[in-house]
Image (cartoon, rainbow, N blue to C red):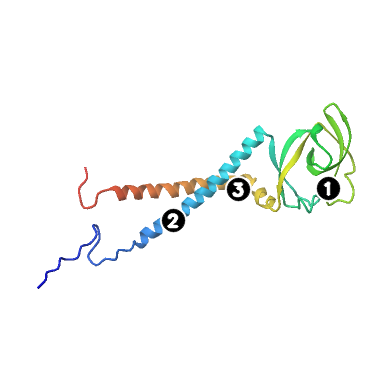
Amino acid sequence: MTLEAPPQHAPGTRHGAASSPRPRAVGRAAAALSGRVLLDVLALGGLVCILLVIASFVWKVTIVMFATGSMAPGIPAGSIALVREVPAVEIEVGDVVTVDRAPDLPITHRVVDIQGVEGDAVTFTMQGDANADPDPFPYVETSVREVLWSAPGLATVIAPLQHPLVLGGITLGATALVTWAFWPRRRALEDADAPRGHASE
């Protein structure tokens, strides 16, 4: 007759209990993963904002949003563009530039003619790519903002983010998300490190 040793069980498990992870542990892991993904997205957005602020101060790069389609099809309505402030004496025919027109909105069109240069001031004419005629009056400027890059459709996403209530909501949401993601995980780690079945000092 052969005697068999009793079956061995992993420490901390009951006899006959399944070895698969508990549903609560799986749910906690899924929640932690979701929180990490959201944190990564927020971190990426924050990094983009930081880079834009640095670019604005160092290289004078800002964002322009297009409300009309005067520069279609290259830059349709709803597009955004990165623009960089440059001296007006550097512009050439064919450049797409933004000119401030306070109290009206800035205008972004293509330079079609440079009529004269007097010191730092340049007199030039612009025309929208979708317009049949040039702008009615020439512009006299010492500096303009040259378009470096544009992307369609992003103005509708960025415009609402400029509202103070939206910015405040995003800040509060990010704070709540960070608290939710890190605080429960820290407590879970402490519970996992505590010895089971033995008194601790």
As drawn, 135 above or below 30: above
Q: Gap between marks 1 and 2, in whole Å? A: 51 Å
User: At label 3, which amino acid type do we have?
Assistant: Val
Reading the image, the residue beneath label 3 is 166
**Image point (35%, 50%), residue name:** 188
Reading the image, the residue beneath label 2 is 31
Q: Gap between marks 1 and 3, in whole Å? A: 33 Å
Reading the image, the residue beneath label 1 is 128
Residue 145, percent from left and from top: 75, 38
Which circle's residue, 2 or 3, is located before the other in the chain? 2
Q: Dividing the image into 4 quarters, which one contains the C terminus?
A: top left
Q: Are marks 1 and 3 in contact (CB under 8 Å)?
A: no
Which circle's residue, 1 or 3, is located before the other in the chain? 1
User: At label 2, which amino acid type do we have?
Assistant: Ala
Q: Nearer the viewer, mark 1 or mark 3?
A: 1
Q: Nearer the viewer, mark 1 or mark 2?
A: 1
Residue 144, percent from left and from top: 78, 36
Could you classify mark 1 by the number of other residues whose Cα lies within 10 Å: few (under 14), some (14-19), or many (20 or more)? many
* SS for callout 3: helix
Q: Are marks 1 and 2 in contact (CB under 8 Å)?
A: no
Q: Nearer the viewer, mark 2 or mark 3?
A: 2
Q: Extreme front residue here?
A: 1
Horizontal arrangement in the rendering, residue 159 relative to residue 116 (left or right): left
Q: Quadrant of residue 121?
A: top right
Residue 190, percent from left and from top: 32, 47
